Image (cartoon, rainbow, N blue to C red):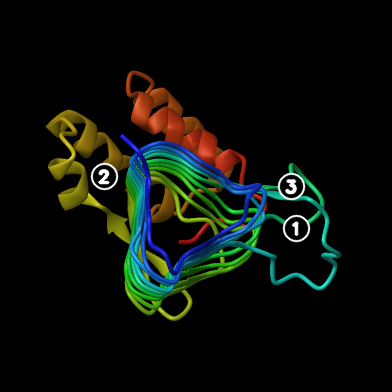
Amino acid sequence: MKSTIHKTAIIDSKAKIDLDVEIGPYCIVKKGVQISKGTKLLSHVVIEGNTVISENCTFFPFSSIGLPPQDLKYRGEPTKLIIGNDNVMREYVTIHRASVGGDETTVVGSNNYFMAYVHIAHNCRVGNHNILANAATLAGHVVVEDFTIIGGLAAVHQFTRIGRYAMIGGLSGVVQDVPPYMVAAGSRAKLFGPNTIGLKRHGFSDRAITAVKKTYKILFREKRSLKDAIRKVREDFAEFPEIGHLIEFIEKNKRGICR
């Protein structure tokens, strides 16, 4: 199916637009951009830079994608932004391409839903099936795994990680890593226990959820050193891959763990 491009849209001749792409009124697509089939730009969308957008994404009015990073050391280097399939970017979402250093790529996976005014900064790596509510903000180099929910107006400090199936309360300030399967909230976010409801909704077994609950108590509520707590968790719950991932996540932390 041929692409539909509104007469008021401005498309650079060096942009690569696949078949079956819809580009609405007053959109701007600059050189270096690649847009795959089934993607829709509703109106007033700006996409630029070395930006690759995969299939069936929808960009609502005034979203700005692939613009330069808000990083003072950036000097126009050819960094990149990659966006996967089936993502929804609501009004005024901003996603910046990477800054220099590291792999020089900002990555957004597939099946994510970003509500209005969400900001994804340079060099972030966002996985799949995440929901970011209105005005949630990720600073540079943040890593978000899969199936998380980040509440409205929450802010995540640079280089912080959010583990899979975690939930972040609205208006939270997250300055340390949030382990997988946990709920965190507060102006300086702290843990409030496992995300039990979320785990049930995603089909986790009762045994796995019980293991997560017990692991939480051992790691964060008993008076043990972290090293000793990890040892006990490994001994007690070796059969659960969910717990294995949780421990691996904690052991890789560099900013400290939210407690």
Please tell me whether residue 197 is drawn above or below residue 174 in the rendered image.
above
Could you tell me which residue is drawn at 13 percent across and 33 percent down?
Answer: 206
Q: Which residue is mark 2?
A: 213
* Image coordinates for residue 209, horizontal then vertical, percent: 21, 38
- Left or right, 134 with respect to 30, comes to left
Q: Earlier in the sequence, mark 2 or mark 1?
A: 1
Please tell me whether residue 250 is drawn above or below residue 124 in the rendered image.
above
Give me the C-alpha separation between circle 3 and circle 1: 6 Å
Q: Amino acid at mark 1?
A: Ser
- Left or right, 250 with respect to 211, comes to right
Label 3 element class: loop
Residue 71 in which image quadrant = bottom right
Q: Earlier in the sequence, mark 2 or mark 3?
A: 3
* Image coordinates for residue 204, horizontal then vertical, percent: 19, 33
Q: Amino acid at mark 3?
A: Glu
Number of other residues with Cα within 10 Å of mark 2, as a class: few under 14, some 14 to 19, many 20 or more: some
Residue 129 in which image quadrant = top left
Tell me, for residue 99, which label it has, or none: 1
Disc 3 to disc 1: CB gap under 8 Å: yes
Q: Which residue is mark 3?
A: 104
